[in-house]
């Protein structure tokens, strides 16, 4: 069992306590170290929280303790003797900076993910024995997943986005849009098109094919299209999409399986240009609609009768 869990205090505090009781850290050194911890806590509270409220100052202390603890553990790998030597010869600020560097590592991995990670996640109370290195490792792993999502999203969107690409910071939104891009890729393959974006003609061709073809051959061809599409993906992208289950196409399969209102549901899961979407919804304001509803358009322009 690790010393922190055994003695119910963060590793850093135990090292300081043991070093002081053993005479390894002099009273003058301990006073200086405590003063440095206090100064850093006030600085953290001032820059990131508030020094007006006592609970915020306390949180600043816990953040400094957490980051310093993380830094020390990374430097000594849970070796108490090495930890005492580091604190005595390098100082507590050195440990804090090492911990801060680990925290800042998240920004290099994924800036958008880093923005959502509160510094308070690294706070440690004086009786907290949580493994902060394990917590940090989990954040790093999530950061890499976030970075990979963005990379894959940009790669797929470069081919299948039907409008100006505006990247959202919400990962759920990115996955939702990414699934629409992937659905579009398979839908275009279903009608044997080598295009990457739907036109009105291609969409009508898809709609006709889906509504006039029996379910069984549809599903067989869909499987073949998925296999063909997947084989063309770069290995890392394919593995990621499989891991997050975006290559299952459950919603697309469900629409084909139920064979009800396919024309209504299919447009909801595809990436369609605004011109196609507007044409499907008879939206005059959306742009040119190939004279499909000219009478309605003219009526729209006429002033109301007095």
Image (cartoon, helix red, strand yellow):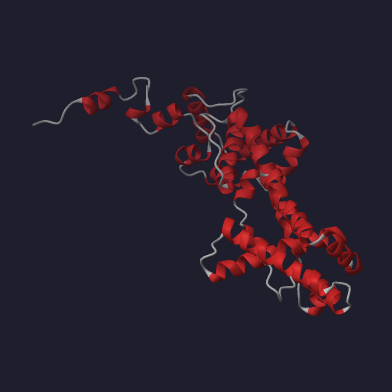
User: Where does the N terminus fall, quadrant-wise?
Assistant: bottom right
Q: Which x, y percent locates residue 102?
A: 75, 53
User: Considering depth in this image, is 165 or 229 the residue closer to the camera?
Assistant: 165
Name above or below for residue 97 compared with residue 84.
above
Q: Is residue 2 above or below residue 258?
A: below
Residue 279's quadrant in the figure?
top left
Q: Which one is nearer the viewer's eye here, 96 or 130?
A: 96
Q: Compared with residue 13, is residue 304 higher up or lower down, i.e. above or below?
A: above
Figure quadrant of residue 168: top right
Q: Provide residue 56's location: percent of width, then percent of height.
A: 56, 66
Count of marks overlaid on the render: 0
- Quarter where residue 44 is shown: bottom right
Q: Depth check: 248 or 131 in front?
A: 131
**Residue 29 seen in render:** yes
**Residue 200: percent from the left, percent from the top?**
47, 24
Residue farthest along the front direction in this orientation: 28
Please tell me which residue is depicted at 68% across the width and 72% down the height of the picture: 125
The residue sitting at the top extreme is 290
Q: Position of residue 159 (x, y in %)?
A: 62, 28
Location of the C terminus (image quadrant): top left
Quick check: 177 left or right of 27? left
Residue ID at (73%, 30%): 232
């Amino acid at each position: 069992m690790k010393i922190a869990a055994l003695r119910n205090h963060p590793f850093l505090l135990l090292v300081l306590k043991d070093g002081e009781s053993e005479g390894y850290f002099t009273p003058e050194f301990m006073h200086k170290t405590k003063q440095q911890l206090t100064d850093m806590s006030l600085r953290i509270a001032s820059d990131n929280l508030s020094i007006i409220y006592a609970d915020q100052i306390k949180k600043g202390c816990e953040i400094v303790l957490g980051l310093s603890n993380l830094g020390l553990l990374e430097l000594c790998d849970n070796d108490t003797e090495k930890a005492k030597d580091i604190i005595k010869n390098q100082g507590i600020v050195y440990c804090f900076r090492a911990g801060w560097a680990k925290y800042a590592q998240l920004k290099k991995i994924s800036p958008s993910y880093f923005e959502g990670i509160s510094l308070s996640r690294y706070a440690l109370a004086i009786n907290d024995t949580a493994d902060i290195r394990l917590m940090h490792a989990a954040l790093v792993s999530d950061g890499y997943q976030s970075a990979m999502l963005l990379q894959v999203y940009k790669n797929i969107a470069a081919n299948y986005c039907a409008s100006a690409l505006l990247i959202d910071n919400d990962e759920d939104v990115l996955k939702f849009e990414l699934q629409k891009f992937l659905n579009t890729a398979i839908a275009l393959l279903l009608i044997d098109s080598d295009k990457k974006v739907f036109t009105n003609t291609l969409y009508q061709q898809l709609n006709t094919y889906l509504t006039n073809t029996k379910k069984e051959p549809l599903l067989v061809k869909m499987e073949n299209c998925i296999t063909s599409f997947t084989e063309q993906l770069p290995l890392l992208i394919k593995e990621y999409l499989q891991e997050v289950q975006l290559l299952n196409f459950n919603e697309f399969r469900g629409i084909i399986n139920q064979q009800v209102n396919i024309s209504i549901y299919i447009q909801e899961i595809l990436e369609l240009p605004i011109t196609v979407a507007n044409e499907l919804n008879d939206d005059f304001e959306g742009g040119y609609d190939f004279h499909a509803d000219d009478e309605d358009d003219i009526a729209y322009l006429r002033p109301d009768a007095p």
